[in-house]
Image (cartoon, helix red, strand yellow):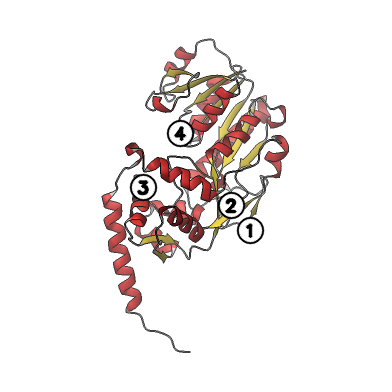
Amino acid sequence: MKALFIGGTGTISTEISKLCVQKGWDLTLLNRGNASIRVPEGARVLCADIHDEQAVTSVLGDETFDVVADFIAFTPEHVERDIRLFTGKTQQYIFISSASAYQKPLSSPWITEGTPLHNPYWEYSRNKIACEDVLMKAYHDHLFPVTIVRPSHTYCERSVPVALHGTYGSYQVLERIRQGKKIIVPGDGATLWTVTHSRDFAVAFEGLMGNAHAMGEIFHITSDESLTWNQIYEAIGRVMDKEVKMVHIASETLGMLSPEWVGALTGDKSNTVLFDNTKIKRAVPQFNATIRFDQGVREALEYIYSHEECQTPDPRFDAWCDEVIEKYENMIAGMPIYMG
């Protein structure tokens, strides 16, 4: 079986690529070659920029594939291009959407694939919804063989889930915890969140590849484990043997301080989410998320602190946290106490 991954070396896709090679897939990765260190032995790499349609057409030639999966399609224009490129050249096209596309605010915290899609807070999510619309229309109009996958918060050995971070990811938050500094937690930290290890995700994804029951269907793939954000940070602290000093600030307030966080917080991480994974388990009976967060985060922290390339400081975010926490706590201290 032949598969083409557009991308294939990211947080989600690296483990899928590894698993596919182990399972005997003839795997080709199409990317710009910037992350060759994460290409599994046995996979072929074609170097081209997917946004250069002519170059991709040239490098692929007359090749056909059983499965094409695009891990870096984010706008309707991207999937319209893929429809042009792969109509008649693949038996299945898998689009990686996002669970953030589900309606916000949710009418129920329990989410199935039938939960309506609507996210007025985050353009990223609205673009994913628009991509799904384009692809499902192509399926209904001329049976373009699409399968849609909606990940939620998926992490790998190189990343640790946090609710709020700066430009360079979670490392600076980890450093604040390690150094005994206070960290900002959106809201009261009591909303339930679902995190999924990429190795677990890979089992479900590979099980959908070439799966006749997946054509024209939509699946979310997540763990069944739900933790509050406070519990997530406490689990990180336990691995580091550090007390996590949390300062809770309303998501709405944080969104006022940086508009880019409105989508990620109000449109995603500040909402309690509980995923019903019945559909993916029915289609892929071997799938069952087995890596608890306390296990996965221990592995991730050990990897991050033993690989310098994962340790990117973010001094601007660090200084911003210090200033915001100091001013917020001073403001609270200066407010009158109500004696009822």
Please tell me the numbered disc located at residue 10.
4
Q: Residues within 10 Å of mark 1 (few under 14, many from 20)?
A: few
Residue at the spot of label 2: 103
For disc 1, the marked residue is 107
**What residue sits right under mark 3 in the picture?**
171
Neighbour tally class for label 3: few under 14, some 14-19, many 20 plus, Cα within 10 Å: many
First in residue order: circle 4 vs circle 2: 4
Q: Earlier in the sequence, mark 1 or mark 3?
A: 1
Q: Tag count in the figure?
A: 4
Q: Are marks 2 and 1 in contact (CB under 8 Å)?
A: yes
Front of the two marks 4 and 3 = 3
Do the CB atoms of the residues marked 2 and 3 lie less than 8 Å apart? no
Q: Is mark 2 on a helix, strand or loop?
A: loop
Q: Which of 34 and 133 is in front in this view?
A: 34
Identity of the amino acid at label 2?
Gln
Instruction: Tell me the distance, in whole angstroms, between the alpha carbons under discs 4 and 3.
Output: 17 Å
Say which mark, if any, is on residue 324.
none
- Whether residue 284 is situated above or below residue 20 in the rendered picture: below
| Residue 175, placed above or below residue 133 | below
Q: How far apart are marks 2 and 3 (CA)?
A: 30 Å
Residue 212 location in percent, x, y? Answer: 71, 27
